[in-house]
Amino acid sequence: MEFSPARSLNLHDWKGEMEDLLRRITFDKHVLCGKPVIRGLRISVEMILELLAKGASSQEILEDYPELEPDDLQAAILYAYQGAIPWAPGA
């Protein structure tokens, strides 16, 4: 995944940025049976992670799903990270 260049963030800014990203992940029992999705779209976090795991580049995903934004992909990865690492910030 292509991320923006590293920049200096203080802890408060970093936590705020993480919270902003995670707000992109929504849950609605009427959309994909309540699975975590991106911004209420019918695009699940699970699908994004599967595409990345199978080798799709972020560019390819964004081209195939033009309603997605680069921060949506980053949000999916952050969501998975917090679920996989129990001591992750915000977990």
Image (cartoon, grey):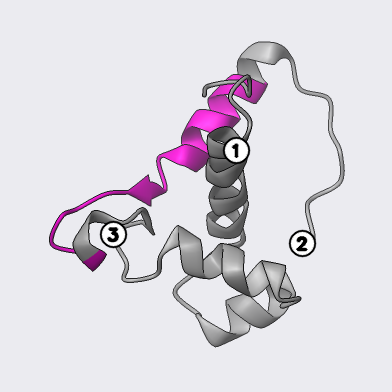
Label 3: how many Cα within 10 Å (few below 14, some 14–19, many 20+):
some
Residue receiving disc 2: 1
Q: Residue at x 40, y 48 (%)?
A: 25
Confirm whether the magenta stretch covers residue 15. yes
Where disc 2 sits, the SS reads loop
* Residue 90 pos. (x, y %): 53, 21
User: What range is drawn magenta here?
Assistant: 14-32
Chain-order first, disc 2 or disc 1: 2
Chain-order first, disc 2 or disc 3: 2
Q: Is residue 68 above or below residue 64?
A: above
Residues at marks 2 and 1 touching, judged by CB atoms closer than 8 Å: no
User: Which dot marks residue 84?
Assistant: 1
Please indicate whether residue 65 sits to the left or right of residue 59 in the image: left
The Cα atoms of the two marked residues, 3 and 1, are separated by 23 Å
Q: Residue at x 44, y 74 (%)?
A: 67
User: Which dot marks residue 40?
Assistant: 3
* Residue 37 pos. (x, y %): 37, 58
Confirm whether the magenta stretch covers residue 10. no
Label 2: how many Cα within 10 Å (few below 14, some 14–19, many 20+):
few
